[in-house]
Image (cartoon, rainbow, N blue to C red):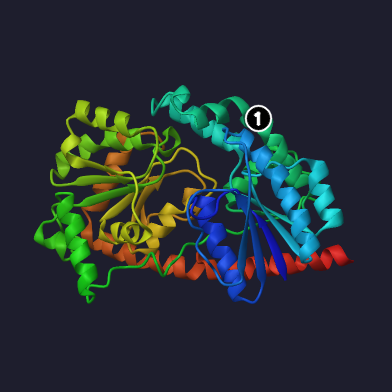
C-alpha cells in the first residue's frame, strides 16, 4: 500500500501528533508499506526512516489560521504525489489540517479513501482553556495560541465536522474524544468511527537497567542535580526520603502546572526532601517560578525547557512518580511514557486519562484541585511497596495494549477495510 499521511507535526517539530505520526509511519513501513508524510516546512533535520518519505509544504505562521493554509498546500502536494505514484490510502491527522467538505470529497472521489484521525477537538481545547483560565492557571490573553483557540475554536470546528461527514473512516484516539465528536458535531447516521488509543515507544521509554554502568551514573547525576539524591534514591529504592516528582508537557495554562505548584507546599510538609521537576517549553515559566517564590517552594522546583529524548527517557526512569494535571486532552501520551518507564502516574480523575490510568497503576485527583492533588501525591509516596507493584503493572499495561506495533497492525486493517469498501 502507498499511504499518504497529512500531519501538521512531524520531527523535528515534535508534539503528540508528531510523535505518533513518526512512529506509526515507521512501523507501517517496516510492515512493507510505502508511506509519504506531507507536513509543514520546518527548520532542522528530519530523521530518516526506511520506507518513509517526507514532503514539506509552506504554511501561514499564525495561530489557528495555519491549519487552513497548511491544508490547502497539502492538497496541492497530495495531487502531485498521486500523479507521481498512485496513493492507495490518505490518512489525515485532525485538527491541525483544516479541509472543507468539498476538499474531502475531492480526495475521496479522485485520489483514495480518507481515514481521519481525531486527536481531540477544537471545542474541547476551547473548554480546556476556559477551565484553566477560571482556575487562574494563566490569563487567556497571555498566550496567542490560547487566545486564538478561545476566540476561533468554534469557527475552525467546522473543518473537523467536514472530516467526520466526508471521510471513509474516522479513528478516535479515545472514547472521550469520540463522545465529544458525537455530542458536538452532529455526525450523519452512517458515521463510521473506531477507537484506537495511541501507544508509545516502549523501547525508548523502559524501566531502569541497573546493570548498565553508564545509565546508573546518569541516574545518579540527575538525582543529585535536583537535590533529591539520598542513598536510597541513587539505588532506585522506592523508600527514598528525597522523592523526585516529574511533570512533562508544554508550559501552557491547559496543562495545569499552576495547580501542581499550588499543591507543592502541602507535599513538602509531609516530604520536605521532595523535589518537583517540570520539563517543557512555553510562555508560563516566569509566572510559575514567581508563584513558587510567593509560596516559599522555589528551592524545590526545577524547570527544564528542553532536553534530548534519551535524557527525557532517563528522567522518566529516575523519577518516583509522574504528575499529569491537564485540564483537557484528546488522549495524553505522557502518562503512557511514564508507565512504560516503570513509573506510576498521578493524574486527573476525568476522561480520557481514566481510560489509561486507575488505582492499579497510579493515583487520581480532582481536576484543578491543589489540595486533592497533594493528597494523591502523598498517598503514592507513603506506599513505596504499592508504588513498586504499580510500576510493574503499568509496564505490563503498555506492552499489552499501548504500543506502536499495536497501532500499525490496527491501522493496516482499517486501511484495508476502507479500500475494500471503496471498491464495491
Along the line of sight, which residue is nearer the eye, 131 or 141? 141
Percent across and percent down for residue 68 are 68, 38
- Under tag 1, what secondary structure? helix
Residue 95, x across and y down, in percent? 63, 43
Left/right of residue 20 with respect to residue 108 in the rendered view: left
Q: Residue at x 66, y 58 (%)?
A: 5
Q: Quadrant of residue 372?
A: top left
At x 15%, y 57%, the residue is 240
The location of residue 255, given as percent across then percent down, is: 42, 39
Residue 87 in view here: no
Q: Nearer the viewer, residue 197 or 56?
A: 56
Q: Position of residue 31 (x, y in %)?
A: 62, 76
Q: To which quarter of the image does residue 290 belong?
A: top left
Q: Which residue is mark 1?
A: 154
Tell me if 181 is positioned left or right of 309 in this view.
right
Seen in the picture, residue 225 relative to 300 is either above or below; the reply is below
Q: Classify the position of the N terminus by image quarter.
A: bottom right
Q: Quadrant of the C terminus?
A: bottom right
Amino acid at each position: 500500500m502507498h499511504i499518504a499521511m497529512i500531519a501538521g507535526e512531524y520531527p523535528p517539530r515534535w508534539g503528540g501528533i508528531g510523535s505518533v505520526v513518526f512512529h506509526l509511519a515507521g512501523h507501517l513501513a517496516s510492515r512493507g508499506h510505502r508511506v509519504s508524510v506531507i507536513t509543514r516546512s520546518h527548520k532542522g533535520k528530519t530523521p530518516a526512516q526506511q520506507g518513509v518519505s517526507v514532503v514539506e509544504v509552506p504554511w501561514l505562521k499564525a495561530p489557528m489560521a495555519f491549519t487552513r493554509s497548511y491544508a490547502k498546500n497539502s492538497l496541492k502536494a497530495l495531487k502531485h504525489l498521486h500523479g507521481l505514484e498512485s496513493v492507495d490510502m490518505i490518512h489525515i491527522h485532525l485538527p491541525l489540517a483544516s479541509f472543507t467538505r468539498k476538499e474531502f470529497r475531492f480526495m475521496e472521489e479522485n485520489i483514495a479513501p480518507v481515514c481521519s484521525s481525531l486527536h481531540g477537538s477544537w471545542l474541547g481545547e476551547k473548554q480546556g482553556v476556559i477551565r484553566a483560565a477560571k482556575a487562574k492557571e494563566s490569563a487567556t490573553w497571555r498566550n496567542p495560541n490560547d487566545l486564538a483557540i478561545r476566540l476561533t475554536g468554534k469557527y475552525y470546528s467546522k473543518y473537523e465536522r467536514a472530516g467526520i461527514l466526508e471521510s471513509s473512516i474516522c479513528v478516535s484516539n479515545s472514547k472521550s474524544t469520540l463522545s465529544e465528536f458525537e455530542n458536538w458535531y452532529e455526525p450523519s447516521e452512517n458515521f463510521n468511527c473506531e477507537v484506537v488509543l495511541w501507544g508509545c515507544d516502549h523501547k525508548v521509554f523502559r524501566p531502569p537497567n541497573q546493570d548498565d554502568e553508564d545509565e546508573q551514573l546518569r541516574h545518579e547525576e540527575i538525582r543529585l542535580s535536583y537535590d533529591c539524591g539520598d542513598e536510597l534514591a541513587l539505588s532506585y529504592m522506592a523508600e527514598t526520603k528525597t522523592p523526585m516528582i516529574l511533570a512533562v508537557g508544554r508550559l501552557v495554562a491547559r496543562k495545569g502546572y499552576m495547580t501542581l505548584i499550588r499543591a507543592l507546599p502541602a507535599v513538602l510538609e509531609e516530604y520536605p526532601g521532595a523535589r518537583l521537576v517540570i520539563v517543557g517549553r512555553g510562555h508560563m515559566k516566569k509566572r510559575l517560578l514567581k508563584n513558587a517564590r510567593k509560596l516559599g517552594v522555589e528551592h524545590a522546583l526545577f524547570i527544564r525547557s528542553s532536553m534530548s529524548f534519551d535524557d527525557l527517557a532517563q528522567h522518566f526512569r529516575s523519577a518516583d512518580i509522574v504528575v499529569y494535571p491537564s485540564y483537557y486532552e484528546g488522549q495524553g501520551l505522557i502518562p503512557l511514557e511514564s508507565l512504560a518507564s516503570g513509573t506510576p502516574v498521578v493524574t486527573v480523575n476525568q476522561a480520557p486519562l481514566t481510560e489509561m490510568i486507575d488505582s492499579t497503576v497510579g493515583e487520581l485527583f480532582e481536576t484543578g484541585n491543589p489540595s486533592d492533588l497533594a493528597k494523591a501525591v502523598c498517598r503514592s509516596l507513603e506506599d513505596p511497596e504499592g508504588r513498586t507493584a504499580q510500576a510493574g503493572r503499568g509496564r505490563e499495561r503498555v506492552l499489552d495494549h499501548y504500543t506502536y506495533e499495536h497501532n500499525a497492525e490496527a491501522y493496516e486493517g482499517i486501511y484495508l477495510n476502507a479500500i475494500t469498501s471503496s471498491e464495491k
